[in-house]
Amino acid sequence: MAERAPIGRLLVERGIVGLAAVEDAALAALSSDSRLCSKLLELGACDESDLAAALAERHGIPGVDLSRTAIDLAALDYVPQGVAEADLLLPLSNEGGRLHLAVASPELAERVVSEVRFVTGRDVSLYVAVLAALRSSIAAAYQAKGQGAAVWRGPAAPSDASPVIAVAAACGEELLELSVDDLLAQEPAPGESGGDVAGTSAAEQVVHAVSVRAGPRRVLVVDDEPAIRLLAQRALEHRGFAVDTAADGLEALEKARAGRPDLVLLDAMLPKLHGFEVARRLRADPATRALPIVIMTAVYRGWRFAQDARESYGAQDYIEKPFRVDDLLRRIEAVLEARNTRPTAAAVALVASGRAAMAEGRLDQAAEMFDEATRADPFSVEAFQESGEALRAKGDAFRAMSAFERAVELRPGLLSALTTLAALYLEKGFRAKAAETLERAVHAAREPATRDQLRQELLRLL
């Protein structure tokens, strides 16, 4: 996954706050051992909903504006006050068979969330919140519960507000309030789905029995969490896609077959029919066999699952949750572009010229040619692998790593790139990454002697 952009830069790029205000708040945060978003909120430079939206974009999960949220305090029974205060998490709702939790950092909360899931026996949905708002809301909500109140309402929520989660799904989007009913079932009415994907629109016509469609590219987003569907839908629509959604595996199959989307963004853990089974059935059906699938998951983690998803279920890409929104969009667009792109003559010629330059020892020229080839064809495995070799020969190890990483992302079983990448990791002190990459190489090797040699190298690292 790409490195996450600093939150300050996101705020400035999205026009939420000016650079000078970010710099002032950052200095103030450093001097007071606070966080940037908390300090911006304290100084009144940003509205909490805008900050939550930026955090949502950065972390790849919905944000929550706690000031506009109202909590049924029965949900607090699932998390003792001491745990909530120590680990910075606040139950927002226990509806829909899930425990909805606000956290300040999804990554840091992962351990305690696993414990909460185990103890309560409930699935958990996470929402990212501004740290200062989260701390004050935890104190206020548990205090209200101790005083016998049934509902706690944020300072900006109406005094008679029913329980509601004020979700900030993406920067620049209107705040969405998810009520209890929304959490139980948030599905568009027939004929009201985004982009009118479910049927044949007026922009389609049939020519010689071949469907020809004008208009935006279409994505079917499949996830049983309403907030994740909304997050992906709004981000995709903002990028110009038409979007339809499904909440379970059976609905996903129906909409994929009827709506003819250009791509399916498919969660692995789905009710009624597992996401991997959905992918298998789509690949088995001649009508949907060529449909690109991007699988996303918070459960099946690691390169082995990613490789199995590609090889066994025909997924073009595999994304772990929590994801960063711009990375999700980049990878969806890359899959769609790859579907319609063939290696260009220019890229092939540049790779050939680069190889000739390498053979003659002209490393700088070779590296430039390979780099230009990767721009001409962003899906050329050969261009990225050759670029990595040239950069390594020049002594530019870190750029070489990036090139080899892209090569094995495009072709996971590329043994030569895996072994070279492992050597580069080890050379620069990334011992664990080297071991992980060697393990991948062992699985990719076909010859028994090669596998044995790689196993010996792997054992020396473990």
Image: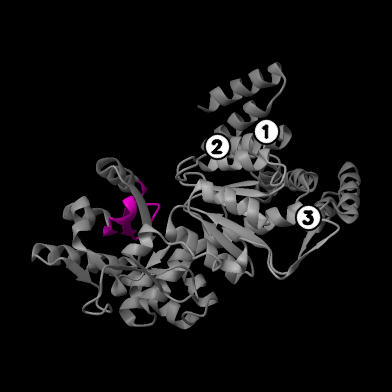
Residue at coordinates 67% horizontally, 29% vertically from top-left? Answer: 444
Q: Observer-nearest residue: 149 or 392?
A: 149
439 is within the stretch colored magenta: no
The magenta stretch spans residue 100: yes
Is the residue 245 above or below the residue 12 in the image?
above
Q: CA distance from mark 1 to mark 3?
A: 31 Å
Give amino acid for label 3: Asn
Q: Which circle, 2 or 3, is nearer the viewer?
A: 3
Q: Secondary structure at mark 1?
A: helix
Determine whether the residue tagged by mark 3 lies in a helix, strand or loop: helix
Q: Which badge, 1 or 2, is on the more N-terminal residue?
A: 2
Sequence-wise, the earlier of marks 1 and 3 is 3
- Discs 2, 3 touching: Cβ within 8 Å: no
Which residue does the numbered mark 2 point to in the structure image? 305
Residue 208: percent from the left, percent from the top? Answer: 86, 58
Of the numbered discs in the image, which one, if any, rests on residue 340?
A: 3
Cα gap from disc 2 to disc 3, whole angstroms: 26 Å
What residue range appears in magenta? 89-110
* Label 2 secondary element: helix
For label 1, count other residues whose C-alpha is less than 10 Å away and answer few (under 14), some (14-19) or many (20+): many
Q: Answer with the quarter of the image where residue 51 lies.
A: bottom left
Of residues 202 and 96, the one nearer the viewer is 202
**Quick check: can you spot residue 299?**
yes
Amino acid type of the residue tagged 1 in the rendering: Thr
Q: Work out whether residue 289 or residue 89 is closer to the camera in this orientation and state it.
A: 289
Residue 206 horizontal/vertical position (percent): 80, 62
Q: Is residue 259 left or right of residue 387?
A: left
| First-in-chain label (2 vs 3) | 2
For residue 419, the mark is 1
Could you classify mark 2 by the number of other residues whose Cα lies within 10 Å: few (under 14), some (14-19), or many (20 or more)? some
- In this view of the protein, which residue sits in the foreground, 212 or 69? 212
